[in-house]
Image (tube, rainbow, N blue to C red):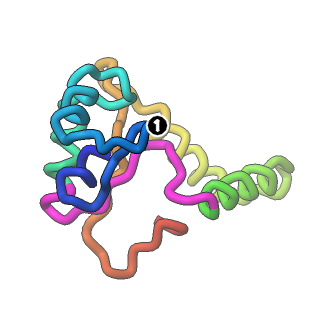
Amino acid sequence: TLFLAEIGALLLVDEKHTTISLKEIYEKVAEGKSGCCWEGFEVYRHLKSLGYIVGRHDIPWSLKSARGSLMRLEDSSDENSLSETAMDTSTIVQLLKDLHIMEVTPSFEVYLPNSKFRKTSP
């Protein structure tokens, strides 16, 4: 939200339809109560300024990709239907999701700039 407000792509309003200033948004992020901390925002802003495609870790890019993940989970519930490759892939994905290095977990999923990138299939 702050990044979009900074670049002028988002105008944030409160329940009274009063515009929330950039300063107020900065203060909310600095408090760290909004699910984002200042350091996380600076990392996000830096990656975006370099042209990377950045999304929150372990949060679906779109409803379509969320539904696709759910369907893959439902399809894989029958263990006999899993191929060895699919099991290897799901094991690797699970290990990456559970990645903790000295109590640090991933915050973002970062992709190289690519004109063919689709949020429905990152």
Residue 52 horizontal/vertical position (percent): 24, 62
Describe residue 91's horizontal placement relative to residue 100 as left or right.
right
In the rendered structure, does residue 61 fall within the stretch colored magenta? yes
Q: Considering only vertical position in the picture, is 16 above or below 67? A: above
Check the image and report above or below for 82 versus 96: below
Q: 119 or 17: which is nearer to us?
A: 17
Query: Which residue is pictured at 60% across the width and 61% down the height?
Result: 65
Q: Which residue is mark 1?
A: 15
Q: Which residues are magenta?
A: 48-63
Per the image, label 1 sits on a secondary structure element best described as loop
Q: Is residue 58 found inside the magenta-colored segment of the image? A: yes
User: Label 1 sits on what residue type?
Assistant: Glu
In the rendered structure, the answer to whether residue 84 lies left or right of residue 52 reads right
Q: Residue at x 35, y 21 (%)?
A: 33
In the image, taking residue 107 as reference, residue 89 lies left or right, namely right
In this view, 56 is above or below 115: above
